[in-house]
Image: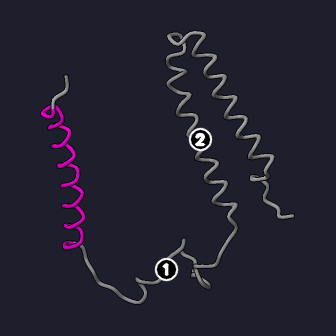
């Protein structure tokens, strides 16, 4: 049976972590140099002078491809524990993984059918 006292080490660790973060932020704010000039406050992008407004809208395709990459990349995280425990999971684990991969492929075919990965505009 768990008691509230069992959670004290977790709370202590959380307090130490938050204390470290706050202390580091405050220390760097007070100890670091703060010389501001017009040149330092300018935007810097790979050594190339910035041109125009940074708020120019661009295609949502970049965001969509990034989100799809993360979505399908995270699925590999779920496959790793299955591969490690392949023998212990047996036939049931194999069937469940086929169902999982089938649903993943179903989602992928949906994305392809919707044209989310096409770059050219029609």
Residue 54 in the magenta stretch? The answer is no
Q: Quadrant of the N terminus?
A: top left
**Label pair 1/2, CB-CB below 8 angstroms:** no
Please determine whether, in this image, residue 92 is positioned above or below residue 23.
above
User: In the rendering, at what x and y percent does residue 110 appear?
Assistant: 75, 43
Check the image and tell me how it is coloured. Answer: one colour
Q: Quadrant of the C terminus?
A: bottom right
Please determine whether, in this image, residue 62 is positioned above or below residue 112.
below
Which residue range is magenta in the image? 4-31
User: In the rendering, at what x and y percent does residue 96 appear?
Assistant: 61, 20
Q: Is residue 83 left or right of residue 62?
A: left
- From the image, tell me which residue sits under label 1: 43
Dot 2: what SS?
Answer: helix
Q: Main secondary structure of the magenta part?
A: helix
Please determine whether, in this image, residue 58 is positioned above or below residue 6.
below
User: Residue shown at 57%/81% (left/top)?
Assistant: 50
User: Residue shown at 20%/67% (left/top)?
Assistant: 26
Q: Nearer the viewer, residue 11 or 37?
A: 11
Quarter of the image for residue 7 reads top left
Q: Is residue 66 left or right of residue 2?
A: right
Q: Nearer the viewer, residue 67 or 8?
A: 8
- From the image, tell me which residue sits under label 2: 73
Instruction: Answer few, some or many: residues within 10 Å of disc 1's Cα (few below 14, many 20 plus, some between 14 and 19).
Output: few
User: Residue shown at 59%/41% (left/top)?
Assistant: 73
Residue 27 in the magenta stretch? The answer is yes
């Amino acid at each position: 049976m768990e008691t509230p006292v069992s959670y004290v080490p977790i709370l202590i660790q959380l307090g130490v972590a938050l204390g470290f973060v706050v202390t580091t932020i405050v220390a760097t704010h007070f100890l670091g140099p703060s010389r501001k000039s017009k040149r330092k406050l300018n935007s810097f992008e790979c050594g190339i002078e910035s041109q125009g407004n940074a708020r120019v809208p661009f295609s949502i395709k970049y965001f969509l491809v990034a989100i799809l990459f993360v979505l399908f990349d995270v699925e590999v995280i779920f496959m790793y524990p299955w591969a490690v425990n392949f023998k212990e999971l047996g036939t049931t684990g194999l069937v469940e993984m086929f169902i999982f991969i089938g649903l993943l492929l179903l989602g992928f075919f949906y994305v392809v059918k919707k044209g989310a990965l096409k770059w050219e505009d029609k």
